């Protein structure tokens, strides 16, 4: 059954890339469909939790909403839901977590959401959907070896555990090589191959991308970029669900 689901999942993701414009990739990026041995041979807990809920952002400024909805749906997959429990849509999430800062930041014409602002938004979103013991740890990127070690450690931990998720904030052009990707972007980490040192990104910019791997070095480089609005580097959120 898992083999059948895996084949179907890869087929649907591959087909989606041909349904719109052809995907673009940077020099270190690899399409999931061309590099899927890790998913075949490892538990890939976050991949299986997130892939069912892989959403396209509803507009060019709503990557934070799509990324949050993916993570929240994946987190709820272990809850006892009923037929009346709707999946978390981007529209539904914005209505339930009715924060002015978030609503003004997303949507066409919005200014985007900075990492420092996204952390409390994720905390509020988790509580709104019943995750009272969840924690959100914010880490800004830098060029130190300590940061590189922390990223590696968190990626390893995230890959081992089905109860935590990483949401990366990065400059999209560093990952994809697309010169138009010159603004901050959000996406969940779907897997980490520690042997190959590659990170699987579920980019919500589905007009152009299917899931892709980037090197751990590129992952760090993309986060270690300046958010001009806050004059701080980007980084990531490490979400731990805790005991619910």
Image (cartoon, rainbow, N blue to C red):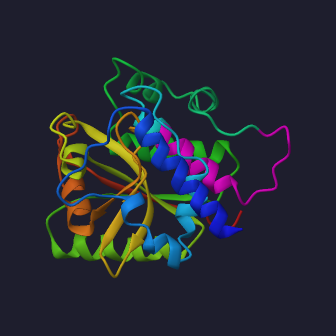
Q: Looking at this view, is 205 or 116 the one in front?
A: 205
Classify residue 51 by image quadrant.
Answer: bottom right
Residue 48, position as x, y percentages in the image: 59, 62
Q: Residue furthest top?
A: 109
Queried whether the magenta region covers residue 209, the answer comes back as: no
* 177 horizontally vs 60: left or right: left
Residue 58 in the image: above or below residue 167? above
Answer whether residue 204 is visible to the viewer in this image: no
Classify residue 199 by image quadrant.
Answer: bottom left
* 224 horizontally vs 201: left or right: left
Q: Residue furthest bottom?
A: 195
Queried whether the magenta region covers residue 67, the answer comes back as: yes
Residue 171, position as x, y percentages in the image: 23, 45
Q: Looking at this view, is 102 or 47 the one in front?
A: 47
Q: What residue span does the magenta drawing correspond to? A: 66-85
Please state, as top left, top right, bottom left or bottom right, where the N terminus lies in the image.
bottom right
- The structure residue drawn at horizontal position 69% and vertical position 40%, both measured from the top left corner, is 87
Residue 124, position as x, y percentages in the image: 56, 43
Answer whether residue 107 is visible to the viewer in this image: yes
- The structure residue drawn at horizontal position 37% and vertical position 62%, both measured from the top left corner, is 34
- The structure residue drawn at horizontal position 62% and vertical position 26%, both measured from the top left corner, is 95
């Amino acid at each position: 059954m898992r083999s059948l689901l895996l084949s179907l999942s890869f087929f649907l993701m591959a087909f989606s890339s041909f349904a719109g414009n052809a995907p673009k990739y940077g020099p270190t990026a690899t399409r999931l469909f061309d590099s899927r041995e890790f998913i075949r041979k490892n538990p890939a807990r976050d991949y299986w939790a997130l892939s069912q809920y892989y959403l396209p952002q509803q507009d060019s400024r709503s990557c934070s909403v799509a990324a949050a909805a993916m993570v929240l749906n994946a987190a709820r997959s272990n809850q006892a839901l009923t037929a009346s429990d709707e999946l978390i849509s981007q529209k539904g999430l914005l209505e339930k977590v009715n924060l002015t800062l978030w609503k003004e930041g997303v949507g066409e014409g919005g200014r985007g959401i900075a990492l420092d602002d996204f952390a409390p938004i994720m905390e509020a979103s988790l509580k709104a959907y019943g995750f009272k013991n969840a924690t959100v740890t914010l880490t800004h990127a830098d060029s130190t070896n300590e940061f590189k070690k922390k990223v590696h450690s968190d990626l390893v931990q995230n890959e081992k555990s089905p109860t935590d998720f990483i949401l990366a904030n990065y400059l999209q052009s560093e990952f994809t090589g697309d010169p138009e990707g010159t603004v901050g972007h959000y996406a969940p980490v779907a897997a980490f191959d520690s042997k190959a040192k590659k990170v699987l990104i579920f980019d919500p910019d589905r007009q152009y991308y299917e899931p892709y791997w980037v090197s751990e070095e590129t992952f760090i480089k993309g986060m270690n970029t300046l958010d001009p609005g806050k004059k701080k580097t980007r980084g990531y959120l490490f979400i731990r669900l805790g005991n619910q």
